[in-house]
Image (cartoon, rainbow, N blue to C red):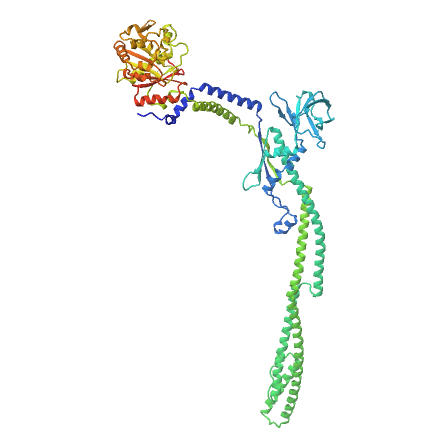
Amino acid sequence: MNEINFDLKTSESKSIGQIFKSYLKYWPVIIATVIACLTLVFLYLRYWSQNEFEINSTIYLKSISSGKNTGDIEGFRDFGLIKTTQSLEDEIGIITSSGIMEEVITDNFLNISFYVKGSIKDVEIYGEEVPVQILIDENADIVPYDQFIDLTFIDETSYQIRTEYEKQEYNNTHAFGETVNTKFGVFTILKKPEVRDITQYKPLRFLVSDKEQLATSYLKNLSVYPDNDTGSLLRMTFVSTHKTKGEDILTKLINTYIERTIKYENEIAENTIKIIDNRLKLLSGEIENVEKSVVDFKTKNVVTDVSSNADTYIQQANDYKEKASDYQSQINILSQVEQTLLNGTIENSIGGGFSINDRTLTEQISKYNATLLERQNLSQSAVTSNPMIIKLDGNLSNLRQSILQNVQSTKNGLSLAKRNLQENANRYDAQLARVPGMEKKLLDISRDKSTKEGLYLYLLQKREEEVLSLAAPASSTRVINQPKAGLYPISPNKKLTYLAGLLLGLFLPISIIYFKNTFNTNITSSDEVKQLTAAPLVGEISKNKDSKLILTKEEEGEEQSPTLELFRLLRFNIDYLIKDAPNKTIMITSSVKGEGKTFIAANFALSLASVGEKVALLSFDLRQPSLMSYFNLDEKNGITDFIIKKGIDKAPLLQSYSNIENLQIMGSGKVIGQISTIVLHERVGILINELKQEFDRIIIDTAPIGLVSDAYALNPFIDSTIYVVRENFTKKEHLSIVENIYQNEKLKNCMVLLNDTAPKDTYM
């Protein structure tokens, strides 16, 4: 098979178990780092961190309006006489303005901070914890902004201040209430009246901050936002390093906002009263002018009440028309009588006498008709020449003439009276026709009067409301929840900080190990061996620093070595892997010098011999032999002598070690040139074959295969190969040699042994 691609092999991913296992061997370092990080977190939280508390409060903004029924007079909003409903966004802007915060700082001396000096950090104190009050002259040329000043109380009347300004130390004693005039500022320190024994207080240090900068800092820690989408509740939060101070700042901020709101509303009320008073004066004059216009109009048009006068006009006109109609009826009757008299004879009777209202005329007609009836009765019995008839005819003629005159006279009188009545009716009709115009004119005047009177009354009511609001000022803001700090600080978050410390304690060593492994070109574990080559891993040999030959410990009665047990386990693993073929001759090699192949060969041979196998150990590293030094034996007579000197027997070249009869060791012999030719000599095969006849196992220690090719010459005579890889020494790239040998079967039954590993737990 072809040689594998080493880069491709190293890029294969590891399983989670392999990764975990690769880090697990560093657990003491990881635990130590975690403990160190958690300790640093504890010290940071205890001595360096600054706790921050969140103070919460809720306020309610009532909708403000001015009086009742103001919605009907929208025009007054333009005059500023009506307080419109508050906008939450506008109020939030007012609350978070720098002006209010600076006022809070100024009124409550919050720009001066006090601290108690500590061995590691200073602790801020506030309120009743501070026994003094400091007044800073901010009109002075220099104000001690950001200048720490130490304050020590000497007795009840004096104190000592110390500071450093412009690299010069200031240390002086002053009396309480004295004006201190220094290069770095002018100030006065007063002892609070409630303080009884000021010497009991620890030395302090105070710091004066610029109000504008401090207000900006406080506003960054202030949050104001609607508590819900539809209501008028505002939630306020403030972050402070001191619970009581933070609660006072938020409380005073709310109170200052309320006071400013009341002051603003009172200013509006006062200005509104002034405007109303001026307007009332003008309206009084306008109302008088309107009332005078009504009087002049009624006087001019001779009316008191247009509606009642119109009824009178209608009644009068109807009365006149009714009378004129009656007269017309009489005229019509009289005209009929007149026609009868003009067109008839004395023999014709006159009708309608009863319908005529003139009594005299009625009597004449009645008399005429009676006389005519008498004549008619007389003519039935007498002739027309009868004196009585002639007399009656004369009377009828006279009566007829008299009635005609009377009718004409009465008719003329009625016609004249009718004409007068019609003229009167027409006059009232004309008056009635003027009523709508007068009514409209009077209505306009009355409406103007009513509007001015309504406005006058409204302004009077408004004035009373504003006077009452000044007499009993009430804020449109109500505090629902007083400012209250939380029980636990929001920063630093101890749980989160400890978790971060734990993660950092894990991350640092793991990352270091990761980068170490990433840039480490050496083999670090058996997993890497398995990953980089398909050759079977026959076992691991742990570190052994005390002795080169581990078997000597057991002989000397010392505690059994765990490494010795690994060599015995190695024997079982080799036999298991090569169980289907004879495995008498085992060659041990490596990539380079120093990987422990000779150590493995010596101790492996000892472990085999210790269990009763007859073992021959050959030092075939002819270039730089070192095997015999493990046993303190002579290296001079050995393999090279057997190969070069024909006819020499192998027996004298085999040496025994101590009292281990089953182990025979043959050194490399004299160091000569042309080693490559010697290992290819036919005498090598003769030697190994003869040894196979006498020994159960033949262990061959060869030169590193990564440097020379001597080991390949021995391949025809061996049954298996142990390729030694040393942990944290063998380069990863050298595993490509092993893979090449295994895949191409350059050495028989090639197996990998990992040497110098960390000791494992044992069962003793």
Let me know if residue 646 appears in the view. Answer: yes
| Residue 533 x %, y % | 35, 23
Q: Quadrant of the N terminus?
A: top left
Looking at the image, the residue that sits furthest to the top is 659
Residue found at x 63% / y 91%: 393
* Quarter in which the C terminus is drawn: top left
- For the point 65% across and 87% down, which residue is it? 399
Residue 672, position in %: x, y? 34, 11
Q: Is residue 498 above or below residue 376?
A: above
In the image, residue 353 above or below residue 87: below
Q: Residue furthest left?
A: 693
Nearer to me, 585 or 608 = 585
Position of residue 697 measured from the top left corner of the image (x, y, whole percent): 29, 11
676, above or below 343, in the image? above
Side of 35 where 171 appears, left or right = right
Where on the picture, by quarter, is residue 559? top left
Q: Is residue 473 visible?
A: no
